Structures are given as C-alpha cells and as structure tokens.
Amino acid sequence: MAIYTGAQIAIKLLERQGIKIISGIPGGPILPFYDALSKSDQITHILARHEQGAGFIAQGIARSTGLPAVCVASSGPGATNLLTAIADAKLDSIPLIAITGQVPQSMIGTDAFQEVDTYGLSLPITKHNFLIKSAKELLDVIPRAFSIAMSGRPGPVLIDLPKDVQNEILDISEFPEPGQIEAQPSHSSENNYEEAASLINSAKRPILYLGGGVVHADSADAAIAFAEKSSIPTVMTLMALGTLPMTHSLSLGMLGMHGARYTNLALDECDLLIVVGARLDDRATGKIEKFCPRAKLIHVDIDPSEIGKLRMPHLPIVGDAGHFLKSILPMIELNQRPQWIERINELKTIHPLSKPGIDDISTHFGLINAAANCLPSDAIIVTDVGQHQMWVAQSYPLNRSRHWLTSGGLGTMGFGLPAAIGAAVANPKKTVVCFTGDGSIMMNIQELATAAELNVNIKIILMNNQSLGMVHQQQAMFFDKRIFASKYQTASKFMMIAEGFGIAAVDLDTSSNPELSLMKALQGRGPCLIHSSVDIHQHVLPIVPPGASNLEMIGN
C-alpha cells in the first residue's frame, strides 16, 4: 500500500497511459494537479499562452500521431477558453483528453469564484465527460476516458476535477491497467461485403469517396490498393487529403464546394459511389438531393448514426474503414475500366483546375508552389481556416496520411499555429509548415511565444490580404459587393510582432530575391514567420454558392 493524493493518482495514470506531453495553463483550482505534474519525470508540460492554444497544441499531437493527447485548464474562464478546441475535436473525430480544474465540491452551485458548469457546457461537444466525486473514481475514469477517446469513432473526453478531489488522500495497493482500444461489436454489415464487391465489380463508372475515417484507421495504403486494383477514380474530403497522393493518376482531389469542376462533374456521372469513413457533409455534397443522382451508394462508417443521416444508402456497412478496405480487396476483380478512365481524363482536360500565377511567387498559388518545391515530401502541412486553407487544399501536392492537419467540421480560425506547434513537438525530426492568413493568425498569435520558447521547427507562411478573405469574397460575390466588417482599416506590422515574440521573420514583399529568401527560411531550423502580401481581390474558385448543388459552381 502507498498513499497518493488524487492529483498524484491522475498523474500516475497518465504516465501509465504513455503520455509524454501535456499542454495547458495552470490556475488556482488545478494547482494540486500541477504540483503533482511538476514531480513527474515522464511527462513534459508545454505552457501555452491561451487555453484554446493548449487544446490545439494537443490536437496537433493527436492528429499527427493518431494517439490520444492531453490538455489541461483551470476552472471558469480556463475551461470555457478550452471549449472551442474540444468542439473542434468532436467534429473532426480527434482523440483528446481534456482535464479541467473545478472548485471544491462543497462550493459547486454557489457561483463561487471562477465556477462554471463545465460538465454541462461540454456535454454537447464531447464524446463523453466525467465530473469526478472522489479520488477513487480516478482509477476507473482515466483508463476509461482513454478507451472511449480511442475506440470506435474517436473523439474528445473531458474530466472535470474538483480541487478537493485532487487533494484527497487514498491508499493504493495496485494501479489499473491502461485504457485500451475496445473491440467494436460485430455488425451484420459484414455480411454485406460480398454484395458490395458485386456492386463494385459490375459498376461501369464507380468513384471511391474517402473521408477522415480512413486517416483515423491508418488505412491509406489499403485505400490505394483498393482503388488501384479496380481502377476506381478517387475523391477525398478536406479531412482525407493525402490518403491518395494528389499526383496519383486516379486522384480527383478534393470534392465539393471548392473542388475542381472536373471532380464534381465526374461525381455527377458516376453510377456507384463508395463512401468510406466520411459523413456526407454539406461542404462536400452541396445540395444533397442533387448529389450523384444516378449513383447507387455504398456507405461505410464506424458510427452507425452517420448511416442514412443525410442520404439513405443502397448498401449500409457499419464498421471500421480499414477492416472494410482490407477485407473486400480479395473480392474485387482486376479491372482497367478504360472507358471510364478515358472519360475522367477528358473531363480533366476540358475543365482543368485553374491556378493563375502558379509560377509567380507573389501570387497565392505561386507562393504555395514555391514552398512545396523547397520542402521535403514528408513535411507536415498545417493550415488555419479561410481562403489560404482552400488554396493549399487545391494545389499543394499532399501525398501522405497524417501529414495534412486542418480544421474541417468546425472551421476554427486560430487552429493553425498551435496545432503546428503540437505537430512539431510530436515529430521533432520533421519540418512543419503552417499556412495562415492575417485574420486567422490573430486569433492565437500569442502562441508565437510558445513556439519561440520551445524552439520548434515550424515555418509560418502568412498570406496577408488585410482582410477576412473568405468573408470579403462572399460579400463581393453574394451580397452585391457590400463589403462590411471584413477589411482591416489598419495594417498590422507582423514582422515586428514576430520579432517581439522572439521569432525570426522574413518579408518576401521587400526581398530582392524572394525565392531564395523563402528557400533559406524553410530550410533553416527553428521557428520562422514568412510574410507575403496577396491580392485581396483574388477569390477561391470554383465555389458552390451556399445551398446550391455542386453543378452550380462558379468559376473555372
């Protein structure tokens, strides 16, 4: 028997879970936890500058490794600041363990200083959450939290930890085993594999539709083998980019609102759509009633609630994306599909994705292309949210799973910089590049101090058009050019800001040789901000107007 406080029990259980890094910010009600953490020789703490930043640092770790990551905040404003990162993890199915301090149990419900109902606030945005009532509960809850976060469809789990529970003393003779991924209940859907193979083998114009579930299942290789065996053209959601290399002959790139015209036209002509690990969200499908109207639908998803939620499939399959792809591969016939591939290539020729200025580094596409030419193929690409995100998704030659990190479902500005820090800490031998805009970076710009303190190898490419670019674009296109509250009236001096935080900075606008300056900045070690102005009048095209079908796209 040994005596532990509740806080020491929590740290011990996190160590046994294999956690090496925790990001967070301390405060009064979580200080016993931090005191115990200070004595750990296994866990490194990253002191973020904002709790939302701490949540996205943990997300960068989880997204790039596929393993659960942990973030910590205090009660009240600390917890509420963390909620956006938790909600983002929920929508993108990211395994995240959020631990929040809480006022002592005797004070809960009294409007005590820095008290909020974290449990109640987080219910809609977590996969599961716990309000701990005794130190003994931790022995069950923390391993369970990891199992829940990892098993089935991944997601965030919150543990709200009152201060008195952290200080409670407990005699412990043995710690429980770490939480593991739990086997999912078998579904009768596996009986549908042969029928699915029959539909695929008999289809004349099939398309494979890959979602983030393929990434979570670490099944990119299985997806490629599946597509290649039967010559099936493949589209990817924003979350799945890189699972099939963008340069692959079968790749149709990203579908939907900002997908290439040839991609959406090919989808309209397909006779069988095989959706694997995707939820048919509106940004991908456009008006769902007009999406692939002539196609039969096979829908594979580990979450049964996603099957039929937006469109009823001809063949529903509830299960793991990787298990499906590997199991069905032997049943798929070799098929070159010459007529369908010829038609796909014809659509690509007639309706190419326009990338104006791709050879000019002063343009957005040119800057992305120049960066790609300087970076190794295993660079981890992170984005914030906005025009720059879509331009990178359209044009960067993404070629690996878990090397593309972006906020998909929630679309959170401010995601990029802290997520890039997390990815860099978890992958110290790789270069991490964060593409951001002047609107997005301001949301969590304080994390430049964290990047400087950690000396992480991240490169921040800032595309500056002095506006909220995507809002400005939609006002110009859909609100009769009534531009309001989307253009900044004063120019922020980002070079001075970066240097003030201790970050090296390069301004391509004033460089006599911007290509050389970019290459040196990207190939150097340590954090660096690379600034470049872009034209405010450049739009993300094509674009599907809100509420329209994908065939009503505007632009190239």
Image (cartoon, grey):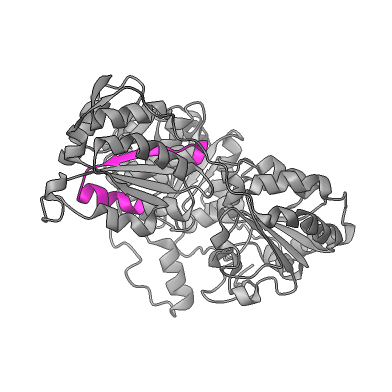
Quadrant assignment for the C terminus:
bottom right
Q: Quadrant of the N terminus?
A: top left
Q: Point out the stretch of residues depicted in magenta.
A: 63-85
Residue 300 or residue 381, whichever sits in front: 300
Give residue 469's position: percent from left, percent from top.
43, 62
Give 84 or 512, whichever is nearer the viewer: 84
Q: Residue at x 18, y 39 (%)?
A: 163
Q: Is residue 549 left or right of residue 43?
A: right
Considering depth in this image, is 337 or 194 the residue closer to the camera?
Answer: 194
Residue 231 among those drawn in magenta: no
From what the image shows, is residue 375 above or below residue 214? above
Q: Quadrant of residue 198?
A: bottom right
Residue 293 lies, with reference to residue 151, above or below; the image says: below
Q: Which image quadrant is residue 386 in?
A: bottom left
At horizontal 21% and vertical 37% (from top left) the residue drawn is 26
In-front residue for pair 258/178: 178
Q: Position of residue 140 (x, y in %)?
A: 36, 37
- Residue 56 seen: yes
Question: Horizontal and vertical percent for residue 157?
Answer: 39, 47
In the rendered image, is residue 457 in sight?
no
